[in-house]
Amino acid sequence: MIQDNIEQVSVYGVLHSPWVQAVLLGLHEKKIPHAIQPIPSLSSLVSSGLMMPAAKINKGSWKLDSEEILKLLGYEGIDKADKVAIFRTWNGVLHRVDNPIAFFHGFSLNKYDHPSLLVRVLHSFLRPFITYYFFTLISFLILTGRRRDPDSFADQFLPWERRLSETDSPYLGGITPNAVDLQLFGIVQCHCSIPYAPLIETIQSDPALPQYRKWITRMQEHFADYKHLYSGQHFGTEAPAALRSGLVERVTYWFGALFMLLLLPITLLSICALALVPKRNY
Ligand SMILES: N[C@@H](CCC(=O)N[C@@H](CS)C(=O)NCC(=O)O)C(=O)O
């Protein structure tokens, strides 16, 4: 159901998440005023842990799930087969923890606006907790055998290559991007935000993916003034790179990361507790 009279949207989420990216791209596309917060509010933390994206429209309750949020913003839902095909293009993302320093560095660079320096510094100090959470989650998935690399990373993009070669429209949604474009491009953004070289090189140069690359370029041109365009620097367009956090925020982030490492038993216990919180719409 579409929400009427949207004046302001708050989004909780990390810029490396494809689903957070999809929501932010949708808000940008529809020119809806919004603010991103890197730390969940207490109410969303209690009911759904660190699950993101969560969005609060005007003064309503926090909502989960990127597709549901996009529907509230006025986008049509995504059919089941498309959802599966979108999700498949995420393969390779679990490699982002191969280099833990690069993983934390990627998170330290995330740019969050807030008029108060004090709030930005406090957020920067707390943000490493979220990085530890996702580092633990991804490492757990790898340890339990969930990372299986295909013979070629190109295969996961082939259904989209076929779809794009069968249409004359610039986007999967026709003359403007729809929720499928936003989620699929959200995953491209996710891959590029902490890049895994073999996967990025496949998208950049595999001869089987010319239409997919053209579509990425069109999406980049369409979203040229979006602030978090991680894919810009990887695909040779004029699109600007994603904005980066300032030095004070970065130093505070690393200080927070070190502090939490020194409190490792408490950090790990909190991560386990949050991982057990049931995720639900509320
Ligand atoms: N279908 C959901 C997926 C959301 C999702 O998987 N979010 C991940 C980050 S990319 C998350 O928050 N995981 C934390 C957890 O499972 O506790 C959507 O489209 O929003």
Image: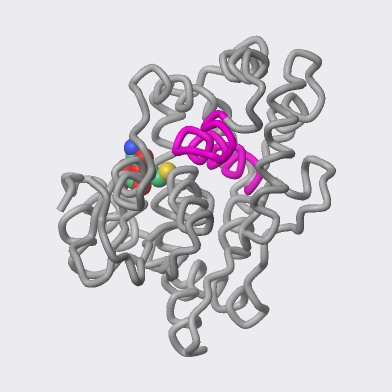
Residue 136 appearing in the image? no
Picture coordinates of residue 78 (x, y %)? 37, 30
In-front residue for pair 278/240: 240
What is the quadrant of the N terminus in the image? top left
Identify whether 66 is placed above or below 204: below
Q: Would residue 122 be found to the left or right of residue 103 on screen?
A: left
Q: Would residue 207 be found to the left or right of residue 35 on screen?
A: right
Residue 118 appearing in the image? yes
Q: Would residue 55 be found to the left or right of residue 45 on screen?
A: right
Identify whether 136 is placed above or below 212: below
In-front residue for pair 25/20: 25
Give the total of numbered labels: 0
Residue drawn at (74%, 39%) of the image = 217
Identify whether 14 is placed above or below 275: below
Picture coordinates of residue 229 (x, y %)? 65, 53
Task: Confirm whether the magenta stretch covers residue 72.
Answer: no
Picture coordinates of residue 271 (x, y %)? 30, 54
Considering every residue shown, the one lying at the far top of the view is: 151
Residue drawn at (49%, 23%) of the image = 147
Quarter where residue 240 is shown: bottom right
Q: Main secondary structure of the magenta part?
A: helix
Q: Which residues are magenta?
A: 172-193
